[in-house]
Image (cartoon, rainbow, N blue to C red):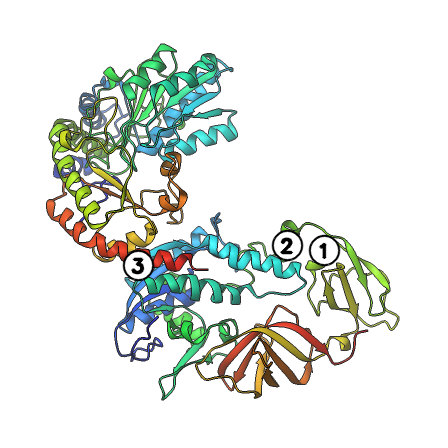
Amino acid sequence: MSDFPGAPDGSPSAPGKLRVLAAMSGGVDSAVAAARAAEAGHEVTGVHLALSSNPQSFRTGARGCCTLEDSRDARRAADVIGIPFYVWDLAERFREDVIDDFVAEYAAGRTPNPCLRCNEKIKFAALLDKAVALGFDAVVTGHYAQIVTGADGVRELHRAVDPAKDQSYVLGVLDADQLAHAMFPLGDTPKELVRAEAGRRGLAVAKKPDSHDICFIADGDTQGFLEQRLGTAPGEIVDVDGTRLGEHSGAYGFTIGQRKGLRIGHPAADGKPRYVLDISPVDNRVTVGPVEALDVAALTGIKPRWCGTTPFAPGAYTVQLRAHGEPVAATAALSEDGAELRVALAEPQRGIAPGQAAVLYDGTRVVGSATIATTERAVLSG
Amino acid sequence: MPYLDHAATTPMLPEAVSAMTAHLGSTGNASSLHAAGRRARRVVEESRETIAQALGARPSEVVLTGGGTESDNLAVKGLYWARRDADPARVRILCSPVEHHAVLDAVEWLERHEGARVDWLPVDALGRVHPEVLREAVERNPADVAVITVMWANNEVGTIQPIVELGAIAREFDIPMHADAVQAFGQVPLDFAASGLDALTVTGHKIGGPYGVGALLLARSATPVPLLHGGGQERDVRSGTLDVPAAAGFAAAAAIAAERQPQHARELALLRDELVLAVQKAVPDAVLNGDPGDPGNADGSGSQAGGRLSASAHFSFPGCEGDALLMLLDARGIECSTGSACSAGVPQPSHVLLAMGVEPALARASLRFSLGSTSTRADVTALAEAIGPVVERARMAGAAARRP
């Protein structure tokens, strides 16, 4: 993939006319992003990704995506912007790379982030590769993040100016090459202004609710979805001493730090609430304990990916450990073979689940990310 | 702008536009008894006569509908219900697997909801149902067949079915037979009386007429159970206030379609053969799907035993994806089709090609080019120049998509 000239971050002043593919979900953000790219003088083509083989007709509230209604909304936005529009079927890739991965991760006792996986494998891989092969220079999306081109021409990924909407965490998996062909025109704008702009531009999606939850679980019932895929697998709920406290119908239904829905009959000896501390798929066992035992002092991440072209240097960073989580101070270093990222947290953090991403920041700049593999508890959980 | 998608819809003929617009400003329900009603009814009946004449039918055999999909549904469901109601043992439907979705999905609906059993008549690699295949399927138990439905010519690959031979078998066993002739009309001679069919579907917008109007030709003995109940218009088979301007526009187009058919077919076949040669020259490994026909003797009339529609050429381009090809051609101003059904605009591998035994990957790599009354040599030249580079690009994208 060759780089392209100019600073195509979607700002109206961007020099050079690029051929860009706008991924249009049918939501307000991607519609405004496409409109901005077109207004900036780029040659924009809109594409709606069909990610479900059996799309439903309508959205249910803020849930779900790639319904026929979303496809229509995207098409109407493209009409208003005045760009060609197509629907591309990536349902098979999505099923393999995102949905099956999601299920497998839960089955292995981890807590995946499917949005991040979708960016890594679908939007900035399957879609981007196809786009580049078809002659496009970049893919533009409605993600809230900023691409800043430094004096040396190196493109950096930064947080969006709207901290409540910042999505740099789910883009932390992008490598320098993917970043070189990405365009995020909304990173410099608060969400409310984007909605207002959509209204001004005559985009009917201006008032459409934001998407939340997991798009391929339309009813929001993740546990039900997993049960359907994985079946029931009754096992034990035990405390840190191994005492049997109750039963569960499948360890995959739990998340580290979960308090509700444990259905343990009798209270703890100290009367304090209990939380999920550990999920062990091998013996199908869920361990619960007091909240202090959730504190994590350090973690290791596998499959590190680096956003920039500058080599990673060990040192002090901030790290974000889940979507919409607070950044926390940490020191990070790589294992000798470079395969493992080791992060020591300045203050212990609660509820860190293997499978989630640890995204490293240097100020607002995304340095890279790794998938959390193991955590080291501040208080040994027995 | 080379428009190579006449099988999707056709530009409206000037004669059809003026026939239709002549009546848009007139008041009158064709079922009303006063003078305005009679004036409207007269337009409808004259239109019916014109349509009947164009198709070798009697005026009373023309049931005006809202288009091809409605006609197909009325024929398939209505004839099935009527026949099953008369004899509960008759629940078997014999259907080709290359039908348009309007037939295919109606048949599958009957299977799911109305106790039908469907025998899919196998097609050969050209997409053709052989008469002996139909005979064998009927003879398995002639007493339990409710209806037979096989399209006159395929909308994707253009293969013409031996409808007369198939119809003869249906008649021999006294089984009602329907044919979807939406694509055939205007391209091959259609004679409803001679065909011996019980029902035949045609539609306006594929022959230079208006959208939203079609007809089901129904033999006088055929009494399908209606889909739409109401005022009892159209032999009590299709209720609903008659669309006078649409009937007039459809009739004008139908008359021209029948009158110009031999010349139209001859001219388009020549142009189509040029297109095929040009594509094969630019992309030597392009696979032409459907009956290759006989380019030396392409009068388009297609002996009743074979042939292909003179207007269409359908190719698979190995290593490409149809949607990428379509987009790249569209960007160059050339409009064609992947030839397959869309719900959310999502291209699925064509059921027609799959039924013909084409591998799914190759089926996804397909494009249909279809010519019509406005097609010119310049359209073919534009395609000939574009297709090579477009296929080359789409192959790179196809390779990228397959990369893990």
Sequence-wise first label, 3 or 2: 3
In the image, residue B21 above or below residue A215:
above
Q: Where, by quadrant of the figure, is residue A358 drawn?
A: bottom right
Q: Where, by quadrant of the figure, is residue B302 drawn?
A: top left
The reply to whether the C-beta atoms of the residues labelled 1 and 2 are less than 8 Å apart is yes
| Kind of residue at badge 3 | Asp
In the image, residue B67 above or below residue B173:
below
Q: CA distance from mark 1 to mark 2?
A: 9 Å
| Kind of residue at badge 1 | Gly
Q: Closer to the camera, B389 or B56?
A: B389
Q: Which mark is residue A250?
A: 1
Residue A138, image x, y percentages: 35, 69
Badge 3 is on which residue? A79
Q: Which mark is residue A275?
A: none
| Kind of residue at badge 2 | Leu
Q: Residue at x 47, y 17 (%)?
A: B84
Q: CA distance from mark 3 to mark 2?
A: 38 Å
Give the chain letter at badge 2.
A
Q: Closer to the camera, A106 or A246?
A: A106
Tag 2 secondary structure: helix
